[in-house]
Image (cartoon, rainbow, N blue to C red):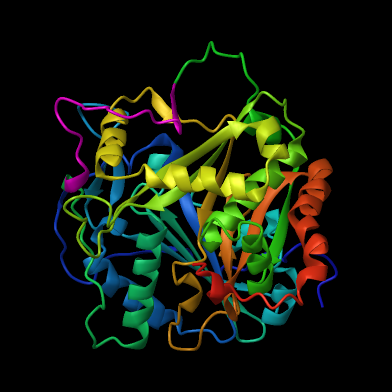
Amino acid sequence: MLKSAELPDCCYPNQPILICPSCPTPKHSLYLSNLDDQKFLRFSIKYLYLFKKSVSLDCLKYSLSKVLVDYYPLAGRLRATSEDDQKLKVDCNGEGAVFAEAFMDITAEEFLELSKKPNRSWRKLLYRVEALSFLDVPPLVVQVTNLRCGGMILCTAINHCLCDGIGTSQFLHAWAHITGKPNLDLPITPFHSRQVLKPRSPAQINFSHPGYTRTNPKDNTHMDIVKFLQSQPLVPTSLIFTTSHILQLKRQCVPSLKCTTFEALASHTWRSWVRSLDLSPSLNAKLLFSVNIRKKLIPEIPQGFYGNGFVLGCAQANAKDLVSANLHHVVRLVQQAKSVLNDDCIRSMVDLLEDKTVKTDLSTSLVISQWSKLGLEDLDFGEGQPLHMGPLTSDIYCLFLPVIGDSDAVRVLVSMPEGIVEKFEFYMKEFLDKEDNKDGNGYHEEDNGLI
């Protein structure tokens, strides 16, 4: 067994290669919408999968070359447009995705022991592309690491400017589908055009958008929580909420309020985060969370849309109110933030983002991204579903992750300064002690119409 949480080094038997589409693909510049090329999204989504049994490297390379025919922008390169160096496009040139193969002297069981909390040594599991800037990193980087036991770890880095979580899941499932069933058509054909999300001319900004602010480097009048957090060593905290735990949270909103699992857990996490940070009572704290807009626009975005089809909902309240409020009140704030996101509001947001001085307001915000309902944990390349699925690294942004083997449970992962983690975990679990004596009251979720 491993003597520490530090992973051994990877051995690379060969230099990484570029995997190009297996047949010619369209050569053109792909327009990126204002939702795609926000500075907030200029990073790669990094997934880590652990499989009990490895898949042939040749099969994975061959199927990747085939799936890149349909998902050809991932084989291209990001560029700044000639008209505006802050506006990005994709040069669909078929240059290829980076594919690295490696070996690590570890077993799947040993990795599972470590899998509750990522640590910095996990970065060894994804090949680091030497690049001068974010634009020089290929949109898709893959590393397959074979293990001593015959298992494998698959890590992927997919540029967020090209797609969101739904799109990454769609691509990974397409790749797995072609690997296991090479002669069958893809279940979903990707739709690459983003014209439906073009801004209007003239712009019609008819709503306030509290999740955004204009760049003003001279404004130092309020605390920047992100800078405060990032100025300290961060450690990940990982908490699993079972179906029973989530039901206990929802009970706090009964009988007058129906709420979803996400609304209840996001509200509870936001409140616990604010409580643990001991913020100034008058500070305006925000919760930013992704909302899928594919069915909210008129007309609806086409099926298979392969771009960023989400906006950030923004709930806000001063810290004093959040700390003193009950969960019912906080859930209402989250629901109100979701309810305003109709077609008019979303298009107003797209128009607002045409102004490149506008940026996501992270200064006093907790950002939550939900990975737990995207089907990411169901990925199967022909040798069975993963033993573990999660991010390669943990950050101050909070992830709601799937729990392998329990589709209704959620794992909450976020990194915080070491001196704050214990308080945050206490507030996150505090309600369980209070509810322990209420389990025998005959309450059933379905009786109360909760979602």
Where residue 191 appears, as percent x and y from the top left, is 20, 61
The answer to if 107 sits in the magenta stretch is: no
- Residue in view at x 31 percent, y 24 percent: 355
- Residue in view at x 55 percent, y 49 percent: 368
Where residue 228 appears, as percent x and y from the top left, is 69, 30
For the stretch drawn in magenta, the main secondary structure is loop
Identity of the residue furthest to the top in this view: 218
- Residue in view at x 62 percent, y 62 percent: 250
Where residue 249 appears, as percent x and y from the top left, is 66, 61
Q: Based on the displayed image, in which of its 4 quarters is residue 112 positioned?
A: bottom right
Q: Is residue 151 above or below residue 14?
A: below
The answer to if 206 sits in the magenta stretch is: yes
Q: Based on the displayed image, in which of its 4 quarters is residue 389 positioned?
A: bottom right
- Which stretch did the figure color magenta? 196-214
346 vs 68, nearest the viewer? 346
Left or right: 250 as drawn, with respect to 232: left
365 vs 271, nearest the viewer? 271
Q: Quadrant of the N terminus?
A: bottom right
Q: Is residue 35 above or below residue 283?
A: below
Where residue 139 appears, as percent x and y from the top left, is 37, 53
Q: How many marks?
A: 0
331 vs 438, nearest the viewer? 438
Q: Do we see residue 127 in this rendering?
A: no
- Residue in view at x 59 percent, y 77 percent: 404
Left or right: 116 as drawn, with respect to 1: left
Q: Is residue 428 above or below residue 410?
A: above
Q: Is residue 291 above or below residue 217?
A: below
Q: Do we see residue 256 in this rendering?
A: yes
Left or right: 62 as drawn, with respect to 379: left
143 vs 156, nearest the viewer? 156
Left or right: 42 as drawn, with respect to 85: right
